[in-house]
Amino acid sequence: MRRRLLIGVGALMAMGAAAVTYEVLPSTRARSWNERGIALAEAGHHEEAVRAFAVAADLNPGYSAVHYNMGRSYLALLHTDQAATCFRRALDEDPGNVEASRMLTLTSYALRRYR
């Protein structure tokens, strides 16, 4: 069976089928944008990171990590309202996200204290 598969692939390549295209799934693209946002945030470019995280969230709205990461960047920019919204959304998508819960608690405390 394996030998036939290899012969089949070789035959396809010989016929010019090596240039096969494939569709990148939105979840894969979302992970790429999330990783880009993380790199930007680590470099201190939080505004650009928020934009990258927003693209990832558009591609995969249920991606809890994206909302958490966006919240961290908003917090670094001192946009506590937006940060709290992101942490809430991360928890909506993944109720077991302990870090999002912790950050939401801290952010909510800051919002009450400094208003």
Image (tube, rainbow, N blue to C red):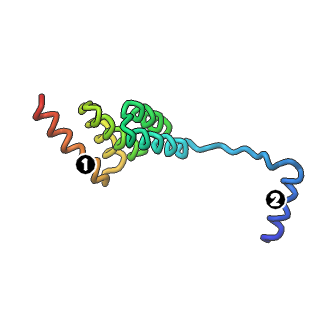
Residue 58: percent from left, percent from top? 47, 34
Quarter of the rendering occupied by the C terminus:
top left
Q: How many marks?
A: 2
Q: Are marks 2 and 1 in contact (CB under 8 Å)?
A: no
Q: Nearer the viewer, residue 92 or 100?
A: 100
Q: Which mark is residue 9?
A: 2
Residue type at the position of mark 1:
Ser
28 to the left or right of 75? right
Q: Earlier in the sequence, mark 2 or mark 1?
A: 2
Q: Nearer the viewer, residue 30 or 93?
A: 30
Question: Relative to 23, does residue 5 appear above or below in the rendering?
Answer: below
Residue lying farthest front?
Answer: 43
Residue type at the position of mark 2:
Val
Residue 82: percent from left, percent from top? 29, 32
Q: Circle 1: is it few (<14), some (14-19), or many (20+) Cα within 10 Å? A: some
Q: Residue at x 42, y 37 (%)?
A: 53
Q: Residue at x 78, y 70 (%)?
A: 2
Question: Relative to 104, does residue 81 appear above or below in the rendering?
Answer: above
Q: Which mark is residue 91?
A: none
109 to the left or right of 41? left
Residue lying farthest left?
Answer: 113
Residue 107 visible in this rendered orientation of the protein: yes
Q: What secondary structure is marked by label 2?
A: helix
Q: Which mark is residue 101?
A: 1
Residue 41: percent from left, percent from top? 38, 40
Quarter of the rendering occupied by the N terminus:
bottom right
Residue 62 visible in this rendered orientation of the protein: no
Task: Identify the image quadrant of residue 71.
Answer: top left
Q: What secondary structure is marked by label 1?
A: helix
Q: Residue at x 76, y 46 (%)?
A: 20
